[in-house]
Structure formats: C-alpha cells, structure tokens
Image: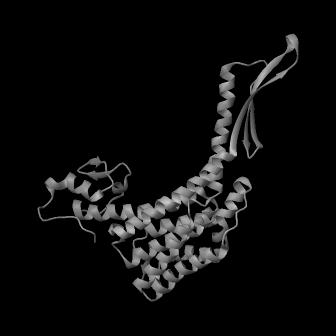
C-alpha cells in the first residue's frame, strides 16, 4: 500500500534526521513526505479497512469522523503549535490527546477497531517529530518511554492480527489421485496451494509414483509456494511497511539512547557499529546489551572510567 509505505518512510526519516528543522524550516525530505500524506488523508483513514477487504473480503466500516479529528489534531500540533509558534505545551498536549485517543480506539476487545491502525501509525509518527524538536531528551524521559512502549505494543498486536489473517488465507491440501482399474490402476500425489479457496498453484508427481518421497516433495513445493504467497501479500498489503514504521519508533528511542550513552560513557562519537543488534562495541568486543543500556555500559566500563564521570540524559 502506497500510503503505508510513505508513513514508513516518514518514520524512518524522522529517526535518521539529525535536525528536522534547518534554518527554521522543516527538513525538505520530511516536508515532502508530509505533504504527500496530507493529500491522501482519506486513504490514511480507510487504508486498513481496504487491506482487510483485499485479504479476505471482509468489509469493516471506519468511523471517519473520529479518525479525521485525530489526524487534524496531530497535524495542528505539528504544523501550528510546534513549527509555527514553537508552543511546547500545546504541541505536546494536542499530539498526545490525538494519539492516546486513537490508542484507546484500538481496543483489543473490539476486533473491528483495527481500522484505526493507519491513522494511529501516522499520528504517533508525527508525535516523535514533535518530541525530537521540542524535547531533545525525550528518549530517556520515563513518561515518553512508557507512552511509546504502549504504542509499540498496541501497534504490534494489530499488525499481528493482519499477519494472521494473511497466513490463514493461504492453505495447502495434499491428495492421492487414482485412475484406471485392476492391473492398470495408478495413483499420484497432488499438492495444491490455495488463497481464499482459489487455486494459486498445483504440484503433481508422476502417475504410478506413490512413494513417500514424492509425497514429501510435492508437499514441500506447495508449502514453499504458500510461504512466497504470504510474504508477497505482506508486502503488497503494506504489512512490511507497518512493521518498518514501528521499528523506526523503537529506534527513535533505543537508537538515540544508545548514541547518547556511547558519547557520555564511552566518551566517543557514535558509530554505525554501535547500532549492531547483537550489542555494543567496547574495546574491540561486542558486548550484549540488556534492556537497561545505561547499567550495562556503566558496569562494563566502570574500571576504565574517570571516577567523576557518569551517564545522564542530554
């Protein structure tokens, strides 16, 4: 889905940008993405409803008024409160109200509330842009960290529901077919990959070959076709873009915190190797990093640190 791809690009751009305001203006690349999204507000509102219909024919109505109001509020927080007036309190308050409202609408007890996922992805991404500009230490302030962990968990829950729907729509059957009678009777194995009960691809063994090896072979071919179909749908329906968006949220916190702690504790600029998912590079070794990055770094480097040095949020 184009819309979700743009949201994912926006999220990644906000995370990667060192400064989204340059000379009082929004970074050109991010501004271009924002302008694209503004032109497709209705598609943002209905994107997930359309995805569900494409996956399995289920038509779910979205409360356009609620979604539109949330998008309008977070846009106002970004453009008016943050960019134009630099009003920290208003920008943070309005963006929180918009995103928290969508968070509450995405109620796991109400399966149809999944339709609010795409406006939620959009709003939460813009709030990171606001935090990045107006609260530079957002990534180590507990209220923001806790807030975004809730957002990440809620988004991942609903993304998993879409993944489950895609997976369930692809099935495989394996049958042994027969022809002839008496001495001329023969059989063969046939495995079929279906998507929503529509044949995608058929894999057959040779007539007269009813061996277990051939059964396993055609079954594997059909399962491979199913796996490709699932991955293709995940890409085509924007699920990969959704996952990339949530990943960018996580990195906006964890990546920024890593960089800050490397500067403060290891006393050097952050390098690409510092974002290795396996851990941090310290004295030529990759050290596994737990959930508390500060404690990990301080523990590993305490012997070599000046006695008066400590890690703190910028």
Q: Looking at this rendering, what residue extends furthest in the right direction? A: 181
Picture quarter with the N terminus: bottom right
Where residue 65 appears, as percent x and y from the top left, is 65, 77
Q: Looking at this rendering, what residue extends furthest in the front direction? A: 109
Q: Is residue 211 left or right of residue 34?
A: right
Where residue 6 appears, as percent x and y from the top left, is 58, 67
Q: Residue at x 30, y 65 (%)?
A: 260
Picture quarter with the C terminus: bottom left
Above or below for 200 versus 263: above
Where residue 273 appears, as percent x and y from the top left, is 34, 54
Q: Residue at x 66, y 72 (%)?
A: 63
Where residue 36 appears, as percent x and y from the top left, is 61, 74
Above or below for 217 versus 278: above
Q: Residue at x 14, y 53 (%)?
A: 303
Please name whichever residue, 293 or 304, is drawn nearer the observer in this view of the structure: 293
Above or below for 174 versus 42: above
Residue 265 appears in which quarter of the rendering? bottom left
Q: Is residue 193 left or right of residue 36?
A: right
Q: Is residue 267 visible?
A: no
Q: Looking at this rendering, what residue extends furthest in the left direction? A: 307
Please name whichever residue, 173 or 154, is drawn nearer the observer in this view of the structure: 154
């Amino acid at each position: 889905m184009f819309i979700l791809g743009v949201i994912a690009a926006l999220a990644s751009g906000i995370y990667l940008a060192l400064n989204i305001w340059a000379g009082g203006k929004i970074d050109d690349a991010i501004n271009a993405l924002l302008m694209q999204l503004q032109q497709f507000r209705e598609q943002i509102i209905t994107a997930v409803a359309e995805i569900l219909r494409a996956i399995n024919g289920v038509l779910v109505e979205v409360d356009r008024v609620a979604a539109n109001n949330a998008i309008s509020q977070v846009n106002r927080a970004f453009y008016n409160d943050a960019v134009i007036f630099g009003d920290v309190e208003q920008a943070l308050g309005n963006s929180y109200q918009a995103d928290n409202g969508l968070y509450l609408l995405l109620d796991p007890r109400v399966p149809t509330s999944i339709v609010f996922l795409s406006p939620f992805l959009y709003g939460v991404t813009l709030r990171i842009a606001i935090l990045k500009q107006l609260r530079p230490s957002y990534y180590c302030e507990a209220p923001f960290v806790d807030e975004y962990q809730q957002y990440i968990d809620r988004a991942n829950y609903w993304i998993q529901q879409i993944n489950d729907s895609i997976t369930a729509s692809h099935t495989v059957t394996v049958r042994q077919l027969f022809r002839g009678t008496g001495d001329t009777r023969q059989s063969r194995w046939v495995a079929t990959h279906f998507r929503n009960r529509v044949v995608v691809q058929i894999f057959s063994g040779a007539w007269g070959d009813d061996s277990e090896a051939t059964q396993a072979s055609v079954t594997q071919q059909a399962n491979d076709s199913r796996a490709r179909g699932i991955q293709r749908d995940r890409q085509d329906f924007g699920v990969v873009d959704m996952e990339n968006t949530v990943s960018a949220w996580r990195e906006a916190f964890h990546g920024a915190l890593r960089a800050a702690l490397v500067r403060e504790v290891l006393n050097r600029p952050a390098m690409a190797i510092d974002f290795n998912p396996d851990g941090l590079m310290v004295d030529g070794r990759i050290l596994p990093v737990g959930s508390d990055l500060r404690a990990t770094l301080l523990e590993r480097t305490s012997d070599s640190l000046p006695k008066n040095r400590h890690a703190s949020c910028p």
